[in-house]
Image (cartoon, helix red, strand yellow):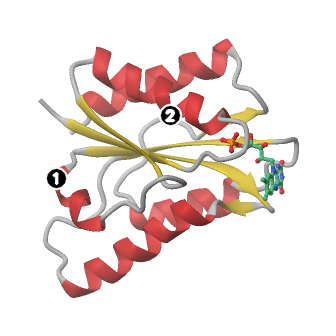
Amino acid sequence: MSLVLVLYHSQEHGNTQAMAEAVAEGARDAGAKVKLVNTNEHRFDPDQYRKIDAAAFGTPDYFGYIAGGLKTFADDWYIAKGKDRQGLEGKPYGLFYSHGGGGNVREPFEKLFKYVGGKQVGETIESRGKPTAAVLRACRELGAELAVVK
Ligand SMILES: Cc1cc2nc3c(=O)[nH]c(=O)nc-3n(C[C@H](O)[C@H](O)[C@H](O)COP(=O)(O)O)c2cc1C
């Protein structure tokens, strides 16, 4: 059974959280175990990254950039990898983000996780405001793909 990490930041309305929960549901329904972490509540230990098979990363657009909690994960991961690379190399990953109408975070988000991740699975999922049924369906599909990716 594979282990999928869904690591996201959600703080304002729960929009990114709703997307994260849909990704997690899709992955579980496809047979994976899921670790769901909101970086607004917990700082994710990058050592745990060794144990996962695939990851989904989610952020709200904050001033055209990634929310600080998720950016902290990327910083922690880079520093941990510099000390001991074993198991910290990129994993297959998917991306999702929420915004209020600007949505300029896509470019820096994709650029940063291209660096942190291995190969991107599916398209980056974008959502404005409260996620629609179509957005949540796309998130579940992403979770299902991550559950079986090699
Ligand atoms: C500090 C802050 C900065 C934001 N900056 C932007 C922005 O530059 N562009 C944009 O479209 N939305 C911006 N937003 C709106 C959020 O991206 C949007 O409400 C998002 O859905 C919040 O996700 P959450 O409910 O998961 O926290 C900002 C919100 C906050 C709190």
Looking at the picture, tell me which residue is in the foreground, 88 or 7: 7
Q: Amino acid at mark 2?
A: Ala
Whole-percent x, y for residue 44 in the image: 37, 60
At horizontal 58% and vertical 28% (from top left) the residue drawn is 18
The residue carrying mark 1 has its beta carbon less than 8 Å from ligand 1: no
Quarter holding the N terminus is top left
* Above-or-below relation of 79 to 120: below
Secondary structure of the residue carrying numbered label 1: helix
For residue 45, side relative to residue 6 (left or right)? left
- What is the distance, in whole Å, between disc 2 and disc 1 at their CAs? 19 Å
For residue 45, side relative to residue 100 (left or right)? left
Quarter holding the C terminus is top left
The residue carrying mark 2 has its beta carbon less than 8 Å from ligand 1: no
Query: Which residue extends farthest bottom?
Result: 83
Quickly name the residue at label 2.
Answer: 20
At horizontal 65% and vertical 35% (from top left) the residue drawn is 14
Q: Amino acid at mark 1?
A: Lys
Whole-percent x, y for residue 34 in the image: 28, 34
Near mark 1 (Cα within 10 A), the count class, few <14, some 14-19 or many ≥20, is: some
Mark nearer the N terminus (2 vs 1) = 2
Whole-percent x, y for residue 65 in the image: 71, 63
Residue 148: image quadrant is top left
Secondary structure of the residue carrying numbered label 2: helix
Whole-percent x, y for residue 128 in the image: 78, 34
Residue 124: image quadrant is top right
Task: Indicate which disc residue 51 carries.
Answer: 1
Residue 134 appears in the rendering: yes
Residue 144 appears in the rendering: no
At horizontal 35% and vertical 45% (from top left) the residue drawn is 55
At horizontal 81% and vertical 62% (from top left) the residue drawn is 63
Query: Which residue extends farthest front?
Result: 41
Give yes or no for contact between labels 2 and 1 (Cβ–Cβ under 8 Å). no
